[in-house]
Image: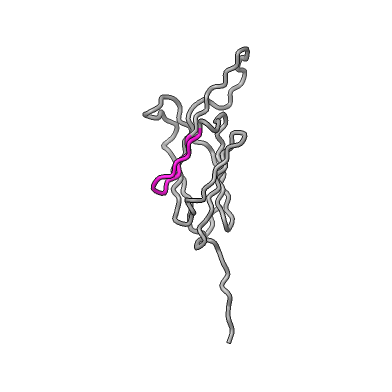
Amino acid sequence: MPTDKTQELQTREPLGTMTEATRPGVLLTPPVDIFEDSNVITVLADMPGVQPGQLKIDLYDGVLTITGHAAAREGSNEVPIVGEYPAGTFQRSFTLSEAINQEQIRATLKHGVLSLRLPKVERAKPRQITIQTG
């Protein structure tokens, strides 16, 4: 549901699933949930099969890009029965406004979910103005 707050985070959607020019294979757009409170924006991105060593997060010129590679699971005596997500590269970009404190961004990856914590700068946080009388 849209709010009347300024947009501090804008998603940059790729034009569908495609092949990345520098790495052959499927390029997937991870679905995200975005939450906001007065101090921070939290982005949760589903990246099943991505291990911490295969995840890269870049911030350049106000654009935050997440890229993770999920390899096909292989076991010595396992036969795949159902596969609900393909092996491939997940990638998604977000344009950050000046309301985000880019020096304080934190990321954690747990059970295939990337959590990005984007704290707001002090001037972007809501505050109350005290009214003086007399």
Query: Which quadrant of the view contains residue 24?
Result: top left
Q: Tell me the quarter of the image containing the C terminus.
A: bottom right
Figure label count: 0
Membership of 31 in magenta stretch: no
Residue at 53 percent of width and 50 percent of height: 118
Give the x, y percent position of residue 91: 47, 36
Question: Relative to 18, does residue 78 appear above or below in the rendering?
Answer: above
- Judged by its main secondary structure, the magenta piece is strand
Give the x, y percent position of residue 77: 62, 12
Q: Nearer the viewer, residue 120 or 81?
A: 120
Give the x, y percent position of residue 114: 56, 39
Residue at 42 percent of width and 30 percent of height: 18
Residue at 47 percent of width and 39 percent of height: 57
Q: Which residues are magenta?
A: 55-67
Give the x, y percent position of residue 20: 40, 30
Membership of 60 in magenta stretch: yes
Q: Looking at the image, what colour scheme do you see? A: one colour
Question: Relative to 102, does residue 49 appear above or below in the rendering?
Answer: above
